[in-house]
């Protein structure tokens, strides 16, 4: 494959995060080269869950319907005692929900990655080169970077230059080393057995995630699709995946979830050992080089948020980068990437650790967590807010998120993907640029200003879901960023219009709303 000698953006790693970033950049007309050491997607199942906030990103990528076809809604999370009695249940909805998608979605990661790659082919701005092992990275000065890679088929060496480099190269990131970042250990490291099984009969279990809180051997069980099931068990000292390679060896572990099937009904897809870690890179950026996904953060998968965090990274950075490259934004907006994303990733890792400790901690702390805290989890501040529904914490304040003191505020949180009065979902109406959602009718002057800033406005009439959302946030209008996040909310629409940034990017999904106009 012939490639150019220079690209605006080079992405190391064509995992789910790298391909998502490339697709989002391409939608804004930004060219990128993605290099991956392997030709195809990583074939082993890893992630099995993503939430409704992240589903909006998949809709933006244009694969919402395709993802629906390969995923199934999950019913939520149950913490179980060693006798499989339910300690507490956190329910997830799939109908009538804030973001228009099921709050929990179960899927197979290789199938999902294949979908991402097929979709990428619709974007000529993105060039994916497989069998390309990145071996060295050098700063050339003036913001430029040179990447050296080896073609694993021909063994030939190649060089390419870029203005921006994205490190989406996973847990052992070379790009992270290049920028001198260090993974900070959040003090969690456990060896787990991951078992994927196909069954010709329905195991007839509750259709959510079962977390077995047993300090002797914690475990997780869930159904992935019509025939696929996943178990994860903590390995004891001296054990390895090799000890569990057959159904007979697995039987003592998985039997509690097998009611009727015989071994002939079950087929092991794989049995693997993973070391679950909690780590956060101290620095996510140096100059024009950025870390995204597992290169920047690692979480134990107890609440299924590792990949979700990576997709949020890609969504957060791509429009800012496109805005700086060809949309008229100043380079300092790129500082907001780490400011906003790092604290959010840390809070989600902390939540996974809380669940992890509830499942595994022994002694007095473990018993208290399981017997006392778990049944009362709904009343534990912070925990309740985050586990009881799929809503994640607001992003921290930055130059692009104007948070103020006080309890009622919308800035940093996601604008709901509500159904509009015309019956469409808000995301399809707002498109991919900045927008104002308002419960007061804009004046002609305000409309002109919004149009000049290349934004759209959506009027939320009295009694609508969005008007009530604004009201609960003590606001009458909000600036919504291209990544669905509220930049600023206010009672004064004209003040908001003045604060609206100008982002001059093409907006491919804007068919429903003319620039400046909208469903008004
Ligand atoms: C058992 C398990 C269960 C999980 N469950 C969940 C879950 O339910 N929900 C969830 O959200 N997350 C889950 N995760 C986490 C999720 O799988 C990862 O967070 C996700 O795959 C990270 O994506 P990524 O694109 O950042 O990195 P990766 O998927 O690791 O991709 C990195 C890519 O970079 C390439 N690469 C690396 N170095 C180089 C180089 N030098 N040159 C060229 N290419 C390079 C690699 O080949 C790879 O393709 C789970 C993980 C595990 C292990």
Image (tube, helix red, strand yellow):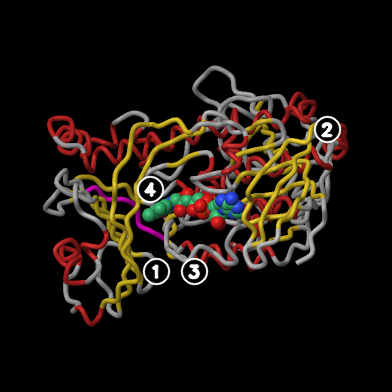
Q: Is residue 227 above or below residue 58?
A: below
**First reached walking from the N terminus: tag 1 or tag 3:** 3
Residue carrying label 3: 70
Q: Quadrant of residue 45?
A: bottom left
In this view of the protein, which residue sits in the foreground, 298 or 378? 298
Q: Quadrant of the N terminus?
A: bottom right
Q: Earlier in the sequence, mark 3 or mark 2?
A: 3
Residue in the picture at 75% in, 62% down: 123
Task: Specify few, some or many for label 2: CA neighbours under 10 Å numbering under 14, 14-19, or 20 or more.
Answer: some
Separation (CA) of disc 4 from disc 2 = 46 Å
Q: Secondary structure at mark 3?
A: helix
- Tell me, yes or no, whether the two marked residues, 3 and 2, touch with CB atoms within 8 Å: no
Mark toward the viewer: 4 or 3: 4
Residue 301 is tagged as 4
Task: Report how far apart the C-alphas of labels 4 and 1 lie in the structure.
Answer: 18 Å
Contact, mark 4 vs mark 3 (Cβ under 8 Å): no
Disc 1 residue crowd, few under 14, some 14–19, many 20+, Cα 10 Å: some
Asked which secondary structure carries label 4, the reply is: helix
């Amino acid at each position: 494959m012939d490639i150019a000698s220079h690209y605006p953006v080079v992405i190391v790693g064509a995992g789910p995060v790298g391909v998502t970033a490339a697709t989002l950049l391409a939608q804004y007309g930004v060219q990128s080269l993605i290099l991956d050491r392997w030709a195809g997607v990583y074939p082993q199942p890893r992630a099995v869950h993503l939430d409704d906030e992240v589903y909006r990103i998949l809709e933006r990528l244009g694969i919402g319907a395709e993802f629906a076809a390969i995923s199934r809604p999950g019913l939520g999370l149950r913490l179980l005692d060693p006798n499989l009695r339910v300690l507490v249940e956190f329910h997830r909805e799939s109908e009538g929900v804030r973001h228009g998608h099921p709050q929990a979605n179960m899927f197979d990661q290789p199938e999902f990655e294949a979908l991402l790659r097929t979709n990428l082919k619709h974007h000529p701005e993105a060039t994916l080169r497989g069998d390309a092992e990145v071996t060295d990275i050098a700063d050339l000065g003036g913001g430029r970077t040179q990447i050296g890679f080896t073609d694993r088929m021909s063994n030939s060496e190649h060089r390419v230059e870029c203005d921006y480099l994205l490190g989406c190269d996973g847990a052992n990131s070379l790009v992270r080393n290049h920028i001198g970042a260090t993974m900070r250990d959040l003090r969690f490291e456990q060896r787990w057995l991951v078992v994927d099984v196909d069954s010709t009969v329905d195991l007839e279990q509750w259709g959510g995630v079962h977390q077995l809180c047993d300090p002797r051997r914690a475990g997780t069980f869930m159904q992935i699709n019509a025939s696929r099931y996943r178990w994860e068990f903590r390995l004891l000292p001296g054990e390895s995946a090799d000890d569990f390679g057959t159904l007979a060896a697995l039987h003592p572990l998985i039997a509690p979830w097998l009611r009727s099937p015989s071994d002939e009904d079950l087929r092991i897809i794989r049995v693997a050992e993973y070391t679950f870690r909690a780590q956060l890179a101290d620095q996510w950026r140096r100059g024009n080089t950025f870390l995204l996904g597992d290169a920047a953060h690692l979480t134990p998968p107890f609440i299924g948020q590792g990949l979700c965090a990576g997709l949020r990274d890609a969504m957060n950075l791509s429009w800012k980068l496109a805005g700086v490259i060809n949309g008229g934004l100043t380079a300092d907006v790129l500082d907001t990437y780490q400011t906003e994303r790092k604290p959010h990733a840390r809070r989600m890792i902390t939540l996974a650790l809380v669940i992890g400790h509830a499942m595994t901690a022994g002694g007095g702390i473990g018993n208290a967590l399981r017997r006392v805290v778990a049944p009362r989890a709904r009343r534990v501040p912070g925990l309740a807010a985050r586990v009881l529904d799929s809503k994640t914490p607001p992003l921290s304040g930055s130059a692009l998120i104007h948070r103020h003191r006080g309890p009622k505020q919308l800035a940093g949180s996601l604008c709901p993907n509500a159904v509009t009065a015309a019956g469409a979902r808000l995301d399809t109406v707002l498109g991919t640029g900045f927008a104002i959602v308002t419960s007061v009718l804009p004046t002609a002057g305000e409309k002109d200003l919004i149009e000049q800033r290349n934004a759209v406005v959506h009027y939320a009439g009295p009694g609508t879901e969005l008007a009530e959302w604004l009201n609960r946030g003590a606001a009458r209008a909000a600036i919504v960023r291209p990544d669905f996040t509220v930049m600023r909310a206010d009672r004064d629409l004209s003040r908001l219009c003045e604060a609206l940034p100008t982002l001059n990017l093409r907006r491919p999904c804007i068919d429903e709303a003319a620039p400046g106009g909208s469903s008004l």
